[in-house]
Amino acid sequence: MKIAPSILSCDFSRLGEEIVAVKEGGADWIHVDVMDGHFVPNITIGPVVTRGARHSTDLPLDVHLMIENPEDYLQSFAEAGATFMTVHAEVCTDLATTVNQIHSLGVKAGVAINPETGLEAIASVLGELDLLVIMSVNPGFGGQAYIPRSTEKVAEARGLLDQYRSSAELEVDGGVDDTNAAALQAAGASVLVAGSAIYGHPDGPETGVKTIREALLS
Ligand code: DX5
Ligand code: ZN
């Protein structure tokens, strides 16, 4: 199981140190939440801060684009050092073309779906995906409560990926912590994103990562 701390909940005055801390705690990827104030009602990180994150670590950067017209920004985030770029199925009129565009930039391609979006939305690109992201909160803000029915959706997504013999990573994003991590693992997730549970941990982000790791089934 990979753990991908979301820097959305970190102290941005100390971005480099906050990234080093989670790596020391055993983080596998760094999750970068990009929001545009249109697709979601919040504005966060752009390519400039993504590049700063890139310079702070050699861990894969998992760039989650919660933006309209993602096609217009893929090159900027690729140049900023993204390892994965994830677009939302809800905003892509031609998902297969967008996924191809990500691949042609030399970046791994992800697609995310909101809690209200069915898995059929990603059917056309299942064979091409490197990463499928199941949103377990409505995107826009860190620190929201996990939507319990997401666990079942993760299990369905796992079934679908296995049926298509896809080796894509299956990521869960939103409200993940040490109370639901093991159930998500059992449902077939391969990557857990956590922001507030890690960066808001009273003993610091390094312990935050370890706490989720320890909650997993061995
Ligand atoms: C939600 C973001 C998530 C989220 C993770 O819009 O995509 O990555 O902020 O943070 P927590 O773990 O606090 O829900
Ligand atoms: Zn995210």
Image (cartoon, rainbow, N blue to C red):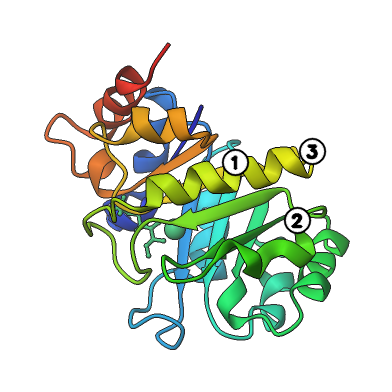
Query: Which residue is identified by label 2?
Result: 126
Estimate the x, y position of residue 67 in percent, counting from the top left. 53, 79
Pointer 1 and pointer 2: residues touching (CB < 8 Å)? Answer: no
Query: Which residue is identified by label 1?
Result: 158
The number of numbered badges drawn on the structure is 3
Image quadrant where residue 35 sits: bottom left
Label 1, residues with CA under 10 Å away: few <14, some 14-19, many ≥20: many
Name the residue at the left extreme: 202
Residue at image point 36% right, 22% down: 213
Q: Secondary structure at mark 3?
A: loop
Residue 165's label in the rendered image is 3
Q: Is mark 2 within 8 Å of ligand 2?
A: no
Against 202, is 88 above or below? below
- Viewer-closest of 36 and 179: 179
Q: Earlier in the sequence, mark 1 or mark 3?
A: 1
Estimate the x, y position of residue 145 in percent, counting from the top left. 21, 56
Label 2, residues with CA under 10 Å away: few <14, some 14-19, many ≥20: many
Marks 1/2: CA–CA distance: 12 Å
Residue at image point 27% right, 35% down: 205
Q: Secondary structure at mark 2?
A: loop
| Kind of residue at badge 1 | Arg
Q: Is residue 114 left or right of residue 112?
A: left
Estimate the x, y position of residue 36 in percent, counting from the top left. 45, 81
| Kind of residue at badge 3 | Arg
